[in-house]
Image (tube, rainbow, N blue to C red):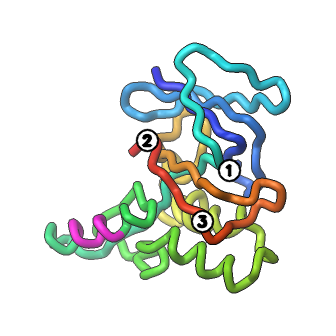
Amino acid sequence: MRKVSAHYYLKSDGTFGKSPVVELDVDGRIVGVREMGSQFKEEAGLEYFPGIIVPGFVASCSSTDPHVIACVKRVGLINGVLRWQEGNDIIALDDYQRAWSAIKEVLKEQRGMAPLGHYLLKHTFRAAQLLGNTEWGIIGEGAIPGLIVLQNIDLRNFSITEKSSFRIIQK
């Protein structure tokens, strides 16, 4: 069993829960999520990541050619896309394959006026819904979304900075 935590996590409604403890089984499936808020305490075996935990970004690819799929996945992985549905082009748009780059571009153009949660949902929960997948794009019990932590985020305003980046916690 693996336990991870951060300052915040993305909820399926686009808001942020404070001080989560996300418990994962050996396969990366979420077995529990506790929002600790101001009651947060260190626990044995808890891995802490500063920032915001979000589900892995979701995309699809209409190609069935293994070489094409491998190339698309490589580009996607660099941009935080951890979940793919192959043989379906419902959301096989370039900005889904380059999710983190697209989110940063839009939010920089909006100069912090756009809600971060809204753009994160587009590439997580809503993308998984388009594909009819209930186990991806959400941080909840029974889900297997893959986890990313967004780092160097302005946590007062929930906005990105020039140094904002992500780190993969669980593939």
> Dot 3: within a 10 Å radius of its alpha carbon, few (fewer than 14), some, or many (20 or more) residues?
few
From the viewer's perspective, tell me whether residue 139 is left or right of residue 131: right
The kind of residue tagged 3 is Lys
The span picked out in magenta is: 69-75
Quarter assignment of residue 151: bottom right
Three-letter amino acid code at disc 1? Leu
First-in-chain label (2 vs 1)? 1
Q: Which residue is mark 1?
A: 10
Which type of secondary structure does the marked residue at label 2 adopt? Answer: strand
- Give the Cα distance between marks 2 and 1: 15 Å
As for residue 73 lying within the magenta part, the answer is: yes
Relative to 148, 5 lies left or right: right
Disc 2 to disc 1: CB gap under 8 Å: no
- When asked about the image quadrant of residue 106, the answer is bottom right
Residue 110, picture quadrant? bottom right
User: Residue farthest to the bottom?
Assistant: 109
Query: Mark 3 or mark 2: which is in front?
Result: 3
Which residue is nearer to you in this view: 142 or 122? 122
Q: CA distance from mark 3 to mark 2?
A: 22 Å
Any part of residue 56 in sight: yes
Q: Position of residue 22 (x, y in %)?
A: 59, 32
Whole-number angstrom distance, CA of label 1 to CA of label 3: 20 Å
At 77% across and 60% down in the image, what residue appears?
A: 158
Q: Which tag, 1 or 3, sits closer to the chain's start?
A: 1
**Residue 31 in view of the camera:** no
Residue under the image location 63 percent in, 16 percent down? 43
Looking at the rendered structure, which numbered label has been put on residue 170? Answer: 2
